[in-house]
Structure formats: C-alpha cells, structure tokens
Amino acid sequence: KGEKSWEKRLSGEVDQLAVNYVESLSYDRRLYKYDIQGSIAHAQMLCAKGFLTADELDAIKGGLAQIQDEIEAGQFEFNVLQEDIHMAVEAALTEKIGDPGRKLHTGRSRNDQIATDMRLWMREEIDILRSKVRDLQGAFVELASKYTKDMMPAYTHLQRAQPIAIGAYLLSFVEMLERDYQRLGDCRKRVNVSPLGSGAVAGSTIPLDRAMTAELLGFEGVMRNSMDGMSDRDFCAEFTFACSLAAVHLSRFAEDFIIYSSSEFDFVRIDDKYCTSSSMMPQKRNPDMLELMRGKTGNIFGSLSAMLMMLKSQPSTYNRDMQEDKLHIFSAADVLRASLDIATAIVSNTQFKTADIAAGLDKGFLDATCLAEYLVRKGVPFRKAHGIVGGLVAECEKQGLAKLADLPLETFTDACDVIEKDVYDNLGATNVVKQYASAGSAGTKQVEEQVAFWRQEFGQ
Ligand code: ARG
C-alpha cells in the first residue's frame, strides 16, 4: 500500500511502533505547498534537460495541482506509512499518473528536497513576521505621537531616575523592533539560496541545471557545495535566534506594562479586552495576555536551544536527527507571530493615565541630574556639582521636604555661591523635560523629531 521503493531492500515487515516514531507527516504536512512548488521546478528542469518529455511534465504538473487542491480541500488522505510529506505527495502522484510520477525523483533526494521546502517556507514566514514587526512599530509610533508632551519618570534599577516625555519611552521599543526587522532581513539572505540539486549528499551524475531550479523558485543563488547544501541548518538556528531576540523585546515590554498597570504604579490602563478576571476575587483585572507574552518567550528560547542541541556534534551531513528541526522553527514562528499580533492590539488600545502620573512626578528627585548640569553650565566641574546636589537631596530628606524646589534660595546659595534665582527654572519635571538638549534625549522636541522620522520611514 505504501509503495515505498525501498520495500525491495528491506523486509517490508511493519512495526507500528517504528512507523509512529519515525514519521514527520503529522507536522511537515504544512510544507505541502512548498514541496509541490519545488517538485514542479525540479520537473521543469528535468524536462529542459531531456529527462522528461513535455507530456510527462504536463502530467506531473497536473497531478501535483490536483494533489494541492485535494490537500487544501481537506480531501487528501495522509497515510502515516509514507513517513513524510515528500513520500505522501510522490505516492499520490504516482497513483494518479503512473510512470511519469516515478521519474520525478530523478537526481533528487529527500535530503535536498526537505532543505528546499524549509527554505521556501521560511522565506515567506520571515516576510510575514517582518510585516507584523512593522505593524507593532507603527502602533508604538502612533501611541508615542499622543504623548509627546506628557511626562513620566524613567527608571534605572527600577528606581526613579529622570523625567521623560512618555513618547520617548514608547519609541525605545520601535528601535528594538527595528533591529529585529533588520535581523530577520539578514537571516532571509542566507535562507534564500538553493540547496536543490545537492541530492542525497554528493550531487548527481545527471547534469541537473541547478541555476534553473534556483531561478524558478526565486532563490538568489545556488549553494556551492552539495554536502553543505543538503545538510546546512544554520538558517534554522539563526531564525530561532532572531525570533528569540524579538521575544526578549516583547517580554520586556510585557513586563513593563504589567508593572505599570499595577495599583502601585498605575501608569497605564490595559483595555478590558486584554485582561481577564479572577474566578474568586470579583474586583480583579489581570493582565494575562501580557503575562503569557512574557511566559511564551521561554518557548521560543526552547526552540533555539533545541535547535543548537540537535545540531551539535552530528556527524557530517544528513542524519535523521534533523527531521526534528521543523518542530522548532514552526513553533518559534507560530509563538512569535501570535505574540506580535497581541502586542500590536494591546499597544493600539492602551491609555496612559497622564494626570495621575503627573501628580506623582515630584517624588524621587527626578530633577537632581538637571540641577547638577545647571551648575556645570555655571562653571562648576561636574564631579563637584554631583556632590553638591547629592548634599541638597540629603538636606531635603533631613528636613522632610518632598522636592528640591521646596528648599529656600539661601540653602542653595550656601551650598554653592554660583547658584541664582534662575535655579528654580531647572527644577521640576516640566522644566527638566524642556531642557533636554542632546540628540536622542527624552524631551518633547526629540520625541517629535523621532515620531516624524518613523512616520516618514513607514510612509505613515
Ligand atoms: N522527513 C525527513 C526530514 O524531515 C526528510 C529527509 C529524510 N531523508 C532521509 N534520508 N531519511 O528530515
């Protein structure tokens, strides 16, 4: 029934345990489209080289198109005895068209076939992921454009640091995502080369036109060495790494928003749609989507480390270990895709509680660095200014004053005689955010410039 050509070599006896253990059909069937695409290109080339007649090529193309329709209509019968998508399609083709189907695998192995299928799949997947990264970037830019003037505290060590325009914080994620976008694009260059024609390991004695199949499949070039061509899985490791780093960024965003939506911070309101409640505590609004985004990062790292573990110390070229690579690239892509989608939805529906945040901006001496820089502008060496301001902060704490601006002028002038009345123009979050002068600072002006830059970049 299986019509495996190696039934002549092996006894043909079947142990269902082994059948179930060796199969990849349950998950590689999602490659059917690429497998058929690759087979059509290979057949066209065989015909051009005189190994198939024009009629045989037509029969193969027709049969494969029919199989694709059947799979897409859910009418194709997958038989686990056929192990994988390649054998399933080939067997169905031969059943449909007879001998021309038996010629399709000329000069080809499942080894270069699967490598081709995965590269075709990944090229498309990368394009989809990149467009989803762009969507999320766009959502961050839109949200940032609403908050160029409103302020929040920036944190380092999760301790209050300096006041910033909220938009500056949001745009920092656009930068991280831009590197993810670029990294996936770099990965795509190494994905988009053709292993087809590498055969089982040593190429073929048949003069295959590899440049032709590469061109038909839209590959940028042909992999030079057959042994590397059919066994290279660097692109899979690279892909899972690019997904991992994007996931790192999503996890940090998720963690921020989880913290910022707590009553202790109360900076953002996550839309109800992206919260769940508690089965027991009636008041709860839990940010479960964000927690899952943070949690699922681990699955993607798992895919990366599984990929590296699988490759490590394998003897040269193809070993069946490699069959498992698909589980990891599919999983990384699926989890990242879903996480990018939900992140975009959440960012597009989040509001910052600007009035509440503003009311708390006097806490934490956010203006201390600005005061030190005021002294620098008056000629005080920075290290000395740092000490003077540190002393003034300690003085506030001693006197139970909430902020530097509560100190009377003579306390300032006692601490340093270059200080004048204009010192108060340098205190308080609003004043500080106006003072930011260096490129890329977290002030309103720089945020507006960055928003304009990204809008132009994205054609928004
Ligand atoms: N299903 C196999 C995989 O995904 C295809 C290649 C099998 N090749 C072989 N020589 N057993 O890796």
Image (tube, grey):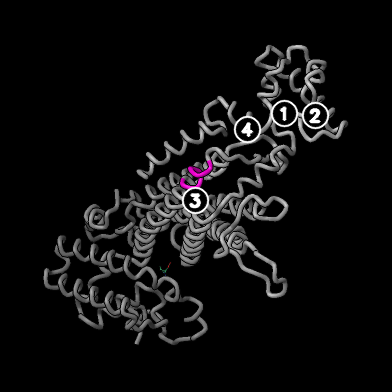
Decide whether residue 39 is among the magenta residues.
Answer: no
209 vs 346, left or right, is left
Q: Specify which label sits upstream in the sequence, 4 or 1.
A: 1
Q: Are marks 2 and 1 in contact (CB under 8 Å)?
A: yes
3 or 4: mark nearer the eye: 4
Quadrant of the image containing the C terminus: top left
Q: Is residue 162 above or below residue 38?
A: above
- Residue nearer the viewer, 30 or 252: 252
- Residue nearer the viewer, 405 or 284: 405
Q: CA distance from mark 2 to mark 4?
A: 19 Å
Q: Are marks 2 and 4 in contact (CB under 8 Å)?
A: no
Q: Secondary structure at mark 4?
A: helix
Q: Which mark is residue 242?
A: 3
Q: Which mark is residue 259?
A: none
Q: Are marks 1 and 3 in contact (CB under 8 Å)?
A: no
Q: CA distance from mark 3 to mark 4?
A: 39 Å
Q: Residues within 10 Å of mark 3 (few under 14, many from 20)?
A: many
Identify which amino acid the numbered label 1 is placed on. Ala
Residue annotated with mark 1: 368
Identify which amino acid the numbered label 2 is placed on. Val
Q: Is residue 49 above or below residue 81?
A: above
Identify which amino acid the numbered label 3 is placed on. Ala
1 or 3: mark nearer the eye: 1
Q: Are marks 3 and 4 in contact (CB under 8 Å)?
A: no
Residue at point 40%, 81% (across, down): 10
Q: Which residues are magenta?
A: 142-147
Q: Specify which label sits upstream in the sequence, 2 or 4.
A: 2
Residue annotated with mark 2: 393
* Residue 107, image quadrant: bottom left
Residue 284 lies, in percent from the top left, at: 68, 66
Q: Specify which label sits upstream in the sequence, 2 or 1.
A: 1
Q: Quadrant of ligand 1?
A: bottom left
